[in-house]
């Protein structure tokens, strides 16, 4: 096939271009990288132009821009909309990386004997959305682009996609498509391809607990005045009971319980608990009573402290009762929990459990809705057929624990269930030091995307 020949003949270049993109430290959370985030947007624009897009625009927002590009070969043909993000998570802590996060290197690993690209953003999401740019280029170059294509690549996904909602609502006509593809998730393994059909939502909070109006000598005052760090720890601990059930009143009110048959089906996915524990070097898993690991991640909500600070953390020892303690706490949500509602429930509860000896402040950072997408749409069927073509095995539908707030927004505003066509693995160390993406995953992804375009055209041609 001409497309696959083109991919094979241009392998080195396809890989090197991705490495160039990975060298740009486009960390959206940290203003220090502002110039780099804009540089990454430009890189995306130029690569879409080189690949053969007719129009490519950098759409400004109050935050980071959205890169929009399209190639309309025939307005009467089907149109595929591709969403991805060029921003990445902070690389901290840098000292835990084996090689610098923005100097990509390819190394072989047990899971990736052909090599994996180590760099922040390699799997999440630069390596994954760039597969579409290259598949598009390959289809164009071989004169075999079966459908129109539109690209919308944003730069604020890792900070909650705040400006995307407005863009989507204001540009419905521009974004009109027959199917939406997003590669920003995982597969079970190279041997067990899968397509994600569920993602959790998110409510992200920050809290401050204040004790006395200044730091105090822990001998003079210790035992008599509240230590806000101790209090914060108690408060956090009380937000879950002995079964790891979240104690915020009303928290589970809207949680959709699955039927026994649905749960059984979910648990049929290949999963080896020992292997899971071994890979993470843990002796036991931990989570809500009466749910399996697959369920705990896929269909149950969580409450987790992402960071906690206060007091003295420098060299040596200092005896002090700090004045303030802080924590960043996120909750992963499942259908039909609403993140605005959950943020409010959290705030009220957190304030209600604070002892009189402290004052608390609570604020919501950002949030996003959970989403479940169809596993019987024509787009899903095309994705299934494409994966079967390249992986030689029919993919199974899975529900994942991560969040992509735009998915629910697409459903609501564009009336379309996106295809969550991820090619990463859960061992890729997303958001972690030594993030990596398999070289094989990258090329298999490019081929599978080209196969999707063929299959989608075939299944939707009258
Ligand atoms: N690619 C991830 C989402 C993801 C990760 C889906 C793993 C499935 C499995 C995405 O870039 C991400 O990290 N999103 C954030 C969203 C948040 C900032 C609203 C997340 O899940 O923490
Ligand atoms: Zn991502």
Image: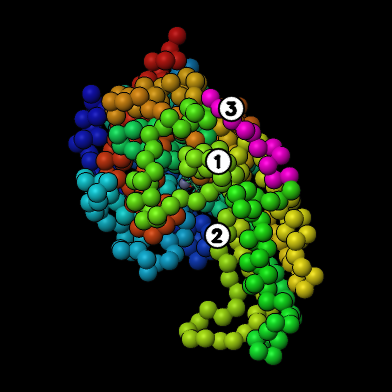
Q: Tell me: 106 left or right of 101.
A: left
Q: Which residues are magenta?
A: 250-261
Q: Where the N terminus falls, by quadrant?
A: top left
* Disc 2 element: strand
Q: Earlier in the sequence, mark 3 or mark 1?
A: 3
Earlier residue among tags 2 and 1: 1
- Which residue is drawn at the image coordinates 52% and 35% (left, top)? 198
Residue at the disc numbered 3: 259
Q: Where residue 227 sits: x, y (%)?
A: 68, 76
Against 405, is 138 above or below?
Answer: above
Looking at the image, is mark 2 or mark 3 earlier in the sequence?
Answer: 3
Place residue 424 in its image quadrant. top left
Q: Secondary structure at mark 3?
A: loop
State left or right for residue 364 relative to residue 60. right
SS for callout 1: loop
Magenta highlight on residue 257? yes
Q: Residue at x 43, y 66 (%)?
A: 93
Mark 3, Cα crowd under 10 Å, few <14 / some 14-19 / many 20+, is: few
Front position among marks 2 and 1: 1
Give x and y (percent) for residue 220: 69, 90
**Residue 133 coordinates in the image, percent (x, y):** 37, 38
- Classify residue 385 by image quadrant: top left
Task: Kindly identify which numbered label has been placed on residue 306.
Answer: 2
Vertical placement of residue 434 versus 194, above or below: below
Residue position for label 1 = 290
Of 255 and 324, nearer the camera is 255
Picture quadrant where residue 268 is located? top left
Tag nearer the camera, 2 or 3: 3
Residue farthest to the top?
Answer: 462
Q: As drawn, which residue projects farthest toward the right?
A: 356
């Amino acid at each position: 096939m001409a497309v696959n020949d083109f991919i094979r003949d241009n392998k080195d270049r396809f890989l090197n271009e991705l490495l160039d993109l990975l060298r740009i430290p486009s960390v959206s959370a940290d203003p220090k990288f502002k110039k780099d985030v804009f540089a990454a947007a430009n890189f995306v624009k130029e690569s879409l132009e080189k690949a053969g897009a007719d129009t490519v625009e950098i759409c400004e927002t109050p935050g980071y821009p959205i890169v929009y590009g399209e190639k309309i070969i025939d307005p009467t043909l089907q149109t595929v909309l591709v969403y991805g993000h060029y921003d990445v998570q902070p690389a901290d802590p840098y000292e835990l990386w084996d090689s610098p996060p923005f100097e990509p290197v390819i190394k072989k690993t047990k899971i990736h004997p052909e090599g994996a690209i180590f760099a922040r953003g390699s799997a999440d999401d630069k390596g994954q959305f760039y597969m579409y740019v290259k598949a598009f280029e390959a289809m164009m170059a071989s004169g075999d682009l079966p459908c129109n294509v539109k690209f919308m690549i944003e730069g604020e996904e890792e900070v909650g996609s705040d400006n995307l909602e407005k863009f989507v609502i204001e540009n419905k006509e521009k974004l009109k498509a027959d199917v939406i593809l997003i590669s920003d998730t995982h597969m079970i393994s190279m041997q067990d391809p899968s397509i994600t059909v569920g993602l959790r939502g998110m409510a992200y909070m920050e809290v401050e607990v204040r004790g006395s109006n200044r730091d105090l000598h822990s001998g003079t005052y210790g035992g008599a005045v509240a230590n806000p760090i101790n209090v914060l720890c108690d408060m956090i601990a009380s937000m879950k009971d002995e079964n790891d059930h979240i104690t915020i009143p009303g928290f589970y009110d809207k949680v959709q319980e699955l039927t026994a048959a649905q749960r059984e089906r979910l648990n049929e996915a290949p999963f080896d608990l020992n292997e899971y524990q071994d890979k993470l070097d843990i002796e036991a898993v931990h989570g809500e009573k009466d749910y399996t690991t697959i369920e705990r991640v896929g269909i149950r909500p969580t409450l987790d402290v992402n960071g906690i600070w206060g007091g003295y953390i420098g060299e040596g020892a200092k005896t002090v009762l700090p004045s303030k303690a802080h924590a960043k706490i996120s909750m992963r949500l499942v259908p039909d929990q609403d993140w605005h509602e959950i943020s409010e429930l959290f705030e009220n509860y957190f304030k209600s459990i604070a002892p009189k000896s402290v004052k608390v402040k609570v604020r919501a950072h950002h949030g996003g809705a959970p989403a479940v997408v169809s596993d019987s749409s024509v787009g899903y069927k095309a994705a299934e057929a494409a994966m079967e073509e390249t992986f030689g095995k029919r993919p199974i539908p899975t529900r994942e624990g991560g969040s992509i707030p735009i998915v629910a927004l697409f459903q609501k505003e564009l009336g379309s269930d996106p295809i969550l066509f991820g090619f990463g693995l859960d061992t890729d160390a997303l958001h972690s030091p030594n993030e990596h993406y398999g070289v094989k995953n990258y090329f298999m992804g490019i081929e599978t995307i080209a196969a999707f375009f063929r299959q989608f055209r075939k299944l939707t041609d009258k």
